[in-house]
Amino acid sequence: MDLNKRNKVLRFLDEHYPNVGCELRYRKDYELLIAVVLSAQTTDQAVNRVTPRLFKTFPRLENLAQAPIQAIETIIQSIGLFRTKAKHIKALATILVNEHDGKVPSDKLILTRLPGVGNKTANVVRAELFKIPEIAVDTHVHRLSWRLGISKRTDSVSTTEKKLRKAFPEERYILLHHQLIHFGRYACQAKKPQCEGCALQSMCKEPHKYLEKPLINRR
Ligand code: SF4
């Protein structure tokens, strides 16, 4: 991606999504970690619907570590993969209590060794809690990256992450991640993106199929 295109993307995102951030609700560091683990393959809204009850029923990390799996399952059963996630939450809480003094580690390697924590979750947690410049590639970020010509559609998540890191300045990573997610969630959706009037049409890899008429007939 050349500098002009890069700056155009940044200007567009700053204009439309100037102050966006994490939409998962949390009060404590470990609550954010658990919320991100729960958010795999489901929406932040779905997670926000279950976490208040989860953290009210088990107000401390120790309570979660000692909780019966079934009790966690009952609270989070409305979200996908709830059985696996319930196991992960309990195991994760146990490890944090026993090995990390109840604190969320910032080290990438240590984070990704925790149950249910992959590279994307670790990146979200590192950026959100520790302000470490990371770009977490979720489905929205992946789609936006190839639509805007930063990566290829067939690129893996890790290749997309590398290309994003190369294309944008490090100090923009954290905000850029949130901006791309918001753009993908609320305008440039997978199935029916709002292409009419989108200022990024000229550099987009697939605007035409989403416009009522092809651009060539619109003059
Ligand atoms: Fe997304 Fe459509 Fe804009 Fe392309 S033209 S970036 S598909 S909204």
Image (spheres, grey):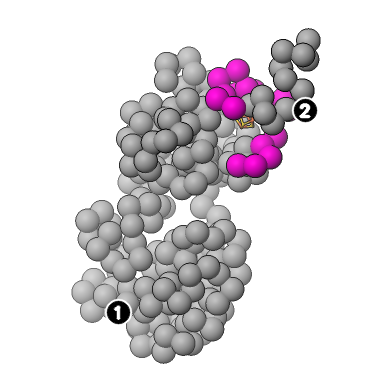
Q: How far is the residue under mark 2 from the one under mark 1? A: 54 Å
Q: Nearer the viewer, residue 184 or 65?
A: 184
Q: Residue visible at 23% across and 79% down?
A: 98
- Tell me which segment is drawn in magenta: 190-206
Q: Secondary structure at mark 1?
A: helix
Near-viewer residue (133 or 195): 195
Residues packed near mark 1 inside 10 Å, few (<14), some (14 to 19) or many (20 plus): some
Expressed as whole percent of the image width and height from the top left, the position of residue 11 reads 55, 25
The answer to which quarter of the image holds residue 125 is bottom left
Q: Is residue 122 left or right of residue 140?
A: left
Asked if the magenta segment contains residue 205, the reply would be yes
Furthest residue toward top: 219
Q: Earlier in the sequence, mark 2 or mark 1?
A: 1
Residue 61 visible in the current orientation: no
Q: Is residue 86 magenta?
A: no
The residue at the point 50 percent across, 59 percent down is 41
Task: Please identify the quarter of the rendering in which residue 33 is found.
Answer: bottom left
The quadrant of the rendering that contains the C terminus is: top right
Is residue 210 visible in the rendered image? The answer is yes
Q: Which residue is mark 2?
A: 212
Q: What label sits on residue 20 in the rendered view?
A: none
Tell me if residue 51 comes above or below residue 173 in the rendering.
Answer: below
Tell me: residue 192, above or below residue 44.
Answer: above
Q: Quadrant of ligand 1?
A: top right
What numbered label is drawn on residue 94?
Answer: 1
Label 1 near label 2: C-beta < 8 Å?
Answer: no
Q: Amino acid at mark 1?
A: Thr
Q: Is residue 82 above or below residue 17?
A: below
Q: Residue at x 66, y 37 (%)?
A: 193
Q: Is mark 2 within 8 Å of ligand 1?
A: no
Q: Count how many numbered circles sit on residues in the image.
A: 2
